[in-house]
Amino acid sequence: MTSFDDREKGFEKKFALDEELMFKSAARRNKLLGLWAAEKMGLSGDDAQGYAREVVKADLEEPGEEDVFRKIRGDFDAKSIDQSDHQIRRAMAETMAEAVSQIETEGKA
């Protein structure tokens, strides 16, 4: 039974690490996405950082990423920023890839 218990603990540990990576990646993606959106809206400096924090907080409203998409879509619409849904979703995917890459690089350092 010891080897079975060891395997079970190993799987549990890997699951916990994977979940932590997913959480960190999503938070980092949201910050990067918020900075991207802030730039499109003409924000910079502290205003851009503040907006990025708002985007990170928006992801806590419900599971998944639709709450983040709706925030950015709504803010773009309110400010008449010409970005399609596809462009926003592409930015979400690109910033997620960048976030994962940054976190993996930090983990190796």
Image: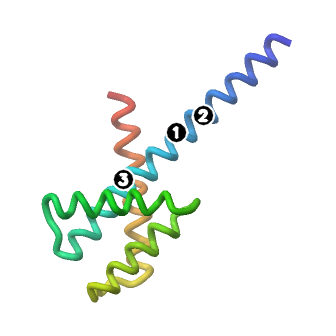
Q: Residues within 10 Å of mark 2 (few under 14, many from 20)?
A: few
Disc 1 residue type (three-letter): Glu
The x, y position of residue 86, in whole percent, is 44, 79
The x, y position of residue 34, in whole percent, is 31, 63
CB contact under 8 Å: marks 2 and 3: no
Cα separation, mark 1 vs mark 2, equals 6 Å
Disc 2 residue type (three-letter): Ala
Q: Residues within 10 Å of mark 1 (few under 14, many from 20)?
A: few
Q: Which mark is residue 20?
A: 1
Cα separation, mark 3 vs mark 1, equals 17 Å
Q: Secondary structure at mark 2?
A: helix
The earlier-in-sequence mark between 2 and 3 is 2
Q: Secondary structure at mark 3?
A: helix
The earlier-in-sequence mark between 3 and 1 is 1
Residue depicted at x 62% and y 31%: 14
CB contact under 8 Å: marks 1 and 2: yes
Would you place residue 56 above or below residue 90 in this image?
Answer: above
Residue depicted at x 52% and y 39%: 20
Q: Which residue is mark 3?
A: 98
The x, y position of residue 15, in whole percent, is 63, 35
Q: Quadrant of residue 30?
A: bottom left
Callout in the foreground (2, 3): 2
Callout in the foreground (3, 1): 1
State left or right for residue 12 relative to residue 84: right
